[in-house]
Image: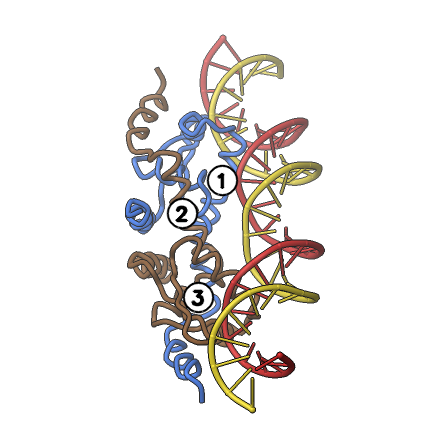
Chain colours: A blue, B brown, C yellow, D red
Amino acid sequence: MHDHEVEVRIASKEIPSDERIERMSRLYKVFGDPTRLRVLMLLSSGRLCVKAICELLEMSQSAVSHQLKNLKDNRLVGCERSGKEVFYFLLDDHVGKIISQGREHVEEE
Amino acid sequence: MHDHEVEVRIASKEIPSDERIERMSRLYKVFGDPTRLRVLMLLSSGRLCVKAICELLEMSQSAVSHQLKNLKDNRLVGCERSGKEVFYFLLDDHVGKIISQGREHVEEE
DNA sequence: CTAATATATGAATAAATAATCATATGAAGA
DNA sequence: TCTTCATATGATTATTTATTCATATATTAG
């Protein structure tokens, strides 16, 4: 028996299921794009309509809408129509926490 | 003046610099791949050599080494040679925290 | 109803990326 | 030295993905 086999057994106790890993990495992937991250940060200060987000990020309406769809599909944001506008808002409390953790990490360097 | 312009000013207070956003999203992107996430989880239980990681993940040595390089380039893991083997270990305290936050989010569904 | 404004969305494209294959490097033992 | 085991790495390929463009849908004003 070799050293690494011992360690394999020790480590393997803690590995989450494939499906859970899939979900987690999908979540992180959402945060892994600068545009989506910026959107999430904007929305952490309050709800915004699409046009406002476009102006703040200086990005095309189409690009922003596509990313908002991604965020919505991943259940990180919700939206509500009000007249011609559609307002987006954060859905999950963890979003803010995850962002601050990442921010801390980045500060450290 | 329209509603969204008001909200723009409110929200824009909190937007981090482009460079910081870039860094943060790059960090999340690392977590956004199932293989890398698995590796990080394994290493959170202790240091492992490459071969052990390959066996635990049932993945080719090449694929694992490429991802380890990614993790090392992003300063999330360090490594140390010991004879023929190279042992990898987590570098950053935040890694564990970020993972548990993501795990919590996923549990909720 | 028509025009104007806000948003959504499908198709196309360019860029990023994860795995594989082949091969190189490095250490240890015969 | 020659071989073997462990790891690293460049090139290639298939897939994913972010943006753009064109267009569709929805709401309100006139």
The quadrant where residue A56 appears: top left
Amino acid beneath label 2: Leu
Considering only vertical position in the picture, is A74 above or below B77? above
Label 1 marks which chain's residue? A
The x, y position of residue A27, in whole percent, is: 43, 53
Categorize mark 2 by other alpha carbons within 10 Å: few (<14), some (14-19), many (20+). Answer: some
Amino acid beneath label 1: Gln
Q: Secondary structure at mark 3?
A: helix
The residue drawn where x is 31% and y is 35% is A46
Q: Secondary structure at mark 1?
A: helix
Considering only vertical position in the picture, is A43 above or below A101? above
Q: Are marks 3 and 2 on the same chain?
A: no
Circle 3 sits on which residue?
B39
> Can you tell which of label 3 and label 2 is closer to the viewer?
3
> Can you tell which of label 1 and label 3 is closer to the viewer?
3
Cα distance in 3D space between marks 1 and 3: 28 Å
Considering only vertical position in the picture, is B24 above or below A45? below
Amino acid beneath label 3: Val
Query: What is the number of the mark on residue B58?
Result: none
The x, y position of residue B106, in whole percent, is: 38, 60
Label 3 marks which chain's residue? B
Q: Earlier in the sequence, mark 2 or mark 1?
A: 1
Query: What is the number of the mark on residue A67?
Result: 1
The residue drawn where x is 38% and y is 40% is A40
Cα distance in 3D space between marks 3 and 2: 26 Å
Circle 2 sits on which residue?
A76
